[in-house]
Amino acid sequence: MGVTIHFEGKLKDKDSLAQCLDLAKQFAEERIWHVKSIDNPEVTLRRVRHEQDWNYVGPVTGIEIQPHSDSEPLRLEFDRDLYVQDYIKTQFAPVNVHVQVSELLHLLDSFFEGLAVEDEGEYFETNDLSLLTKHRDSVSSALSEYLVNPKNHGPVRLDSGRIVDVVENA
């Protein structure tokens, strides 16, 4: 439910991988965002292609960036085909975190054959801060309505770093 930026794309080549990760790491370090490397010989990633769920199983490399303690991590986790598909919820972090993640994705676009970004706040496409704020306020209002019910609570951070907006108590 929270404002989320979804992204996916395939890098141009192996050189683009190194350049993309270097630029992302530099961008994060300039903002004092926590960065950690991703290098796993075999993982399973849940993916969606052509509206069909499927699992990638194999090696991954990349970085995980934590822009803010109240946002989800930004995972630039590339598979053996140099493909990435992920999302980052920024709803609960300051609005400038969403803006800066959008800026970073714009900077990284040149390394991709095609980078598709779907921003639920519409900032990535428009650079319209008032529109982003409107979306965030709308989601906050909807969440507040859910949280009036004493059976509900949230947001809740999972061990994975993902944030669930509302959880219903049993």
Image (cartoon, helix red, strand yellow):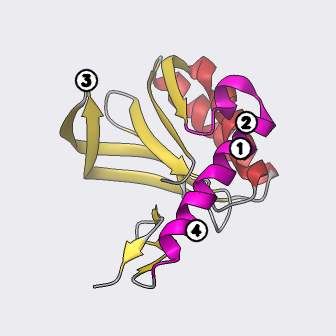
Q: Name the residue beneath numbered marker 1.
A: 134
- Residue at image coords 62%, 18%: 110
What is the magenta range? 120-149
Q: Which amino acid does label 2 sit on?
A: Leu
Q: Where is residue 126 in the image (x, y as percent from the top left)?
A: 71, 24
Q: What residue type is labelled 4?
A: Ser
Q: Where is residue 29 in the image (x, y as percent from the top left)?
A: 75, 53
The mark nearer the N terminus, 2 or 3, is 3
Q: What is the quadrant of residue 52 in the picture? A: top left
Instruction: Verify CB contact (< 8 Å) between mark 4 and mark 2.
Output: no
Q: Name the residue beneath numbered marker 2.
A: 131
Q: Where is residue 96 in the image (x, y as percent from the top left)?
A: 78, 49
- Residue at image coords 56%, 33%: 18
Q: Name the residue beneath numbered marker 3.
A: 50
Q: Is residue 166 above or below residue 94?
A: below
Query: Is 5 in front, or is 23?
Result: 5
Q: What SS does tag 3 mark?
A: loop
Instruction: Verify CB contact (< 8 Å) between mark 4 and mark 3.
Output: no
Q: What SS does tag 4 mark?
A: helix
Q: Is the magenta stretch mostly helix, strand or loop?
A: helix
The mark nearer the N terminus, 3 or 1, is 3
Q: Dot 3: within a 10 Å radius of its alpha carbon, few (fewer than 14), some, or many (20 or more) residues?
A: few
**Gap between marks 3 and 1, in whole Å?**
30 Å
Q: Which amino acid does label 3 sit on?
A: His
Instruction: Verify CB contact (< 8 Å) between mark 1 and mark 4.
Output: no
Q: What is the quadrant of residue 123 in the picture? A: top right
Q: What SS does tag 1 mark?
A: helix
Q: Dot 2: within a 10 Å radius of its alpha carbon, few (fewer than 14), some, or many (20 or more) residues?
A: some
**Gap between marks 1 and 4, in whole Å?**
15 Å
Residue 144 image label: 4
Total count of labels: 4
